[in-house]
Image (tube, rainbow, N blue to C red):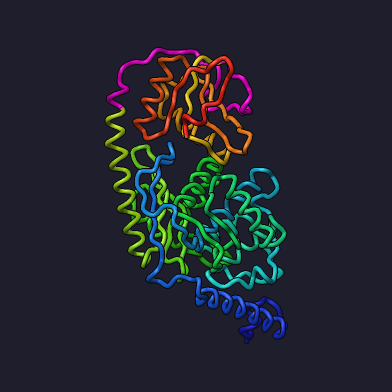
């Protein structure tokens, strides 16, 4: 009969199996000590936060404590997957590629796939292990493959968070296991979810997988909204004692996609109910406003030959002259050029008639921030664009560009 230590480590050495058990016990003890430390919140002191966002425009439909710091728990794995998808797109990883399982990865506490040191797992299976079981061992396997170590990978996570405008998020590990310094906000998590949707649509379907076969077993997922709420097609759940029950959800209805975030739920059931209520209110609001906007824009629009493709975005520095007569600026300043491009695309979708012949540009400022602007716009279309965008709750200013090309930062912030 096979010993318990053999089955847990996958080798014939009892001493080796005991070392694995000791390492797992140490990790569990560390997690418990973190939760008992003075800085950890008790269940009664958890922050409850939520937000629901229009994925097309980035517009916030409803929010409660969106910038309060919370423990992300396994929502952390959304960034682990973002960086994995980036490696796949760049050709540095392939879905079929087998990755080695280190002793450290195998020793992660549950939830996990119970990978054994020395075996391998494909990138695809590791992704599915995360999107369904929220496997901590699979997350570390990916982290080590990409960053060399989980610590180095966490540095990459934080770099990407800054690029995406997640100003209040700090990552310390790839899994979301308890760490007092690993914090995020509901708003930042919505930004990460939108970035995954925008940047990696070819991989998004992994979030809708409810189960998969692995090593002869069926691995089931935790996200019950995939079957409970029509239109939900993914994202991620998370839980630790300190965080409470968290969830990021994306859903489509009537052609509109919403992204919702709930942090600090008391139970999984109450968290899911709160998300359902958020989505219901968000979709009701979107439908009502969509009918109003459709009525306002029902008159026929003249066809104009476009000089720049609708989805093309031009990068320019602050000093680059545009030669346009009027400029439409959307929002204030942004930390990330990726966010600017998403805002520009969303603005074009929200005011297609007015911006049909406009050129979207990313303007880089000297202090490392960015503007979202449209040039090559006539006065009438500039005014029309801002009117349409303001009705969709964008901040917008239209102005005639002076010959000197002076900046108008003071007018827009």
Residue drawn 70% across and 68% down?
A: 102
| Residue 283, image quadrant | top left
Q: Nearer the viewer, residue 25 or 99?
A: 25
Asked if 386 appears above or below 240 in the picture, the reply is above
Identify the magenta region. Answer: 294-323
User: Along the horizontal axis of the image, is 178 left or right of 150?
Assistant: left
Q: Residue at x 36, y 61 (%)?
A: 271
The tally of labels here is: 0
Q: Residue at x 40, y 69 (%)?
A: 45
Residue 296 among those drawn in magenta: yes
Q: Is residue 44 left or right of residue 176?
A: left
Residue 286 placement (x, y as % from top left): 32, 39
Q: Residue at x 35, y 42 (%)?
A: 253
Measured from the top left, where is residue 222 in percent x and y? Answer: 44, 62
What x and y, as percent, mark residue 397?
Answer: 44, 26
Q: Position of residue 71 (x, y in %)?
A: 49, 63
Inspect the magenta stretch and tell me whether residue 108 lies in it. Answer: no
Magenta highlight: main SS: loop
Q: Quadrant of residue 165?
A: top right
The residue closer to the viewer here, 281 or 131, is: 281
């Amino acid at each position: 009969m096979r010993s318990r230590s053999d089955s847990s480590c996958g080798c014939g050495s009892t001493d080796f199996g005991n070392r694995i058990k000791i390492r797992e016990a140490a990790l569990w003890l560390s997690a418990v000590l973190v939760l008992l430390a003075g800085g950890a919140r008790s269940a009664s002191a958890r922050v409850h936060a939520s937000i629901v966002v229009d994925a097309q425009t980035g517009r916030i439909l409803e929010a409660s404590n969106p910038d309060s710091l919370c423990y992300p728990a396994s929502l952390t794995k959304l960034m682990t997957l973002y960086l994995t998808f980036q490696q796949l797109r760049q050709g540095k990883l392939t879905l079929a590629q087998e990755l080695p399982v280190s002793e450290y990865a195998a020793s992660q506490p549950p939830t996990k796939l119970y990978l054994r040191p020395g075996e391998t797992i494909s990138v695809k299976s590791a992704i599915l292990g995360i999107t369904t079981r929220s496997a901590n061992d699979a997350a570390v396997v990916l982290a080590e493959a990409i960053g060399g170590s989980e610590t180095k990978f966490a540095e990459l996570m934080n770099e990407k968070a800054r690029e995406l405008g997640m100003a209040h998020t700090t990552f310390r590990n790839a899994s979301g296991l308890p760490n007092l310094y690993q914090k995020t906000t509901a708003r930042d998590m919505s930004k990460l979810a939108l970035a995954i949707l925008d940047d990696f649509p070819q991989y998004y379907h992994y979030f809708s997988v409810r189960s998969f076969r692995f090593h002869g077993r069926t691995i089931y997922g935790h996200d019950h909204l995939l079957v409970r709420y029509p239109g939900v097609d993914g994202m991620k759940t998370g839980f630790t004692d300190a965080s409470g029950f968290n969830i990021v959800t994306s859903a489509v209805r009537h052609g509109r996609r919403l992204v919702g975030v709930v942090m600090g739920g008391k139970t999984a059931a109450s968290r899911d109910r709160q998300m359902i209520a958020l989505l219901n209110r968000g979709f009701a609001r979107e439908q009502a406003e969509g009918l109003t906007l459709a009525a306002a824009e029902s008159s026929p629009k003249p066809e104009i030959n476009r000089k720049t493709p609708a989805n093309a975005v031009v990068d320019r520095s602050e000093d680059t002259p545009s030669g346009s007569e009027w400029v439409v600026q959307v929002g204030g300043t942004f930390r990330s050029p990726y966010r600017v491009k998403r805002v520009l695309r969303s603005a074009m979708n929200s005011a297609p008639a007015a911006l049909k012949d406009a050129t979207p540009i990313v303007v880089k400022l000297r202090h490392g921030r960015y503007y979202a602007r449209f040039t090559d716009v006539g006065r009438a279309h500039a005014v029309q664009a801002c009117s349409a965008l303001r009705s969709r709750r964008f901040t917008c200013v239209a102005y005639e560009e002076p010959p000197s090309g002076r900046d108008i930062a003071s007018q827009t912030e």
